[in-house]
Amino acid sequence: MEMDMLFNSGILTEERPGAIKPPQELWEKKQNGLVIIECPQRIPCNPCHTSCPTGAVMPFEDINDTPRIDYAKCTGCAMCVAKCPGLACFVVDLTYGGADEALMKLPYEMLPVPEVGAVVDCLDRTGEVVSQGKVVRVMEPWKDKTLVVHVSVPKALVMDIRAIRVVK
Amino acid sequence: MRSTEVMVIGGGPAGLSAAVEAASLGCQVMVVDSDLKLGGQLIKQTHKFFGSKEEHAGTRGFEIADILFRELDENKERIQVLSNTTAVGYYKEDGVVSCVTGEDEYFRVKPQRVIMATGAQEKMIPFPNNDLPGVYGAGAVQTLMNVYGVMPGKRVLMVGAGNIGLIVSYQMKQAGVDIAGIVEFMPHVGGYWVHAAKDRRLGIPIYLRHTILEALGDRFVTGAVIQEVGAKGGLVGEPKKIDCDVICMAVGLTPTCELLWQAGCEMTFVPELCGYVAKRDNQMRTSIPTIWVAGDAAGIEEASSAMVEGRVAGLNAARSTGHLTDTEFDARSSLYWKRLSDLRAGPVGEKIRYGISQACCGSWEV
Ligand SMILES: Cc1cc2nc3c(=O)[nH]c(=O)nc-3n(C[C@H](O)[C@H](O)[C@H](O)COP(=O)(O)OP(=O)(O)OC[C@H]3O[C@@H](n4cnc5c(N)ncnc54)[C@H](O)[C@@H]3O)c2cc1C
Ligand code: SF4
Ligand code: SF4
């Protein structure tokens, strides 16, 4: 009941169709990372599929389908991250950096634009600060003001961190 | 008295699509819109739209308006655009539409065909002090912020977690406004789950099963009182005081249909379409054979479907004025209806599908 209310207010509480983790074995060795999509509701929307250059987000039979991913095809390019209107796509690269480190490619539409090298707050799905991260790159894949910020974060928190906030 | 083959009332996504469709098929078109700038709701939408590629999903709303403006421009020799011009009356005796540009320049138009694409109006809910300065509709907040670049306030309580409430909260957060929370009567958000997730990860609380009891303040809003709603609908728990200087109302829209009433179109109340709408046949034609409806004016839905409905209305107006053959008509028409049924196919389209089944009479001829 409590969990249902949490989910009903926009917090992912467990894996569901349209919101599943990549297969661990492939994920751990995939350089550049794999996509994580958290879009568990059937809605008329498909830019994650139409923006994916490799076909990793599989074709939608019905535009209302939730996204399904062919992880073998995902290159971690983050084109979907920047195109998804729900900001529901993230890329996580477990091969990055030291043993306890990972790289997250997160969508970002706030101001100010984070600077490369800056330390930023990492927020979980409820907006709580769960750690600090370091900005590695800032990209603008579609030149449309939705940025993809590459942040190095503690590996243990990749399933918690979903946004960053610039520390003033 | 001015004349035109097709008059489009309202220059939002539905009206612009209707105008482009009809003009590209050869009609002379006049578009009137009350606002200084065309585009309707689109020019206030800074977020990326949902939908399919054909309806420009993944593109920001105001940029979709730019795409429509370019199409308008490509057909400019056949489209006359009158902004800052409101259609204020429809005389059913002779089909004359009276308009006013600015505040005092009245004129009359005698169109052969009319497409009503007047969009929607915001609803309000009653509570003590809801007339205090600082209680705004979400549309007003968006206009202030995204059209004129004015911050609506410092700390806002949003009422309603439908797509509008969720999206406008996100836009205010982008503009640097603090959001005290979003209050929602239902036990789940009404808008898309991903929009709620976007707000939540920025730290915006969503109070499900809560309602606003009153606005606080003497001369302007200084706070609000909210309280939990129990399973049976009664209030439970203790009232909570929220500090805020703006209360933003996003409790729904209702179709703008005054001109349709004036014209004597057969109207019907359909809760799923959010109010009174004109009965229409399966080509969006009202009971008055020269008037079509499209977009939110025909039932509250989305820009994606509004644009396709506009196309349908424009196509029909063009056929009825002899600008295309039945074969050409059938080809386009089946394409548009396929798109509409795709957009409405899922669970979120269920309400719309039911609403349309209540408002659509199939064909007026039989
Ligand atoms: C915050 C928000 C977010 C949204 N997000 C999405 C989204 O992600 N995807 C999506 O598909 N849709 C979205 N929508 C919905 C979409 O904007 C509307 O469904 C769409 O704009 C409806 O188009 P329309 O042309 O019917 O009406 P409108 O856009 O409302 O245009 C109607 C126009 O008619 C004019 N008008 C009205 N009466 C008269 C008159 N008498 N004379 C002259 N002019 C008149 C008005 O000035 C207005 O310009 C969103 C809406 C809001 C508010
Ligand atoms: S990261 Fe790139 S390859 Fe992977 S799903 Fe997204 S767009 Fe496709
Ligand atoms: S583009 Fe984003 S919101 Fe749309 S279906 Fe794909 S993941 Fe969901």
Image (cartoon, grey):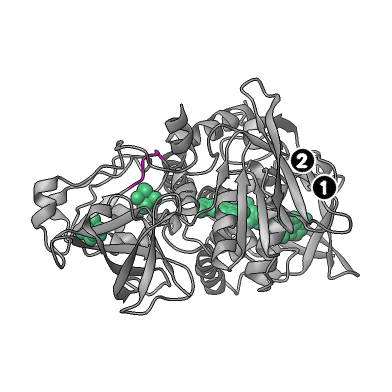
Nearest the camera: B42 or B186?
Answer: B186
Label 2 is found on which chain of the structure?
Answer: B
Query: What residue is rendered at 68% in x and 39% in y?
Result: B286
Measuring from the top left, give residue B318's x and y in whole percent: 58, 54
Mark 2 Cβ inside 8 Å of ligand 1: no
Amino acid type, callout 2? Ile
Q: Which residues are magenta?
A: A38-42
Q: Secondary structure at mark 1?
A: loop
Q: Is residue B194 left or right of residue B80?
A: left
Residues at marks 1 and 2, CA–CA distance in whole angstroms: 8 Å
CB within 8 Å, label 1 to label 2: yes
- Considering the whole magenta stretch, tell me its main secondary structure: loop
Give neighbour class at mark 1: few <14, some 14-19, many 20+ (Cα, 10 Å): some
Q: Is residue B49 above or below residue B184?
A: below
Q: Along the polypeptide, which appears first: circle 1 or circle 2? A: 2
The circle drawn on residue B234 is none
**Residue topped by disc 1:** B130
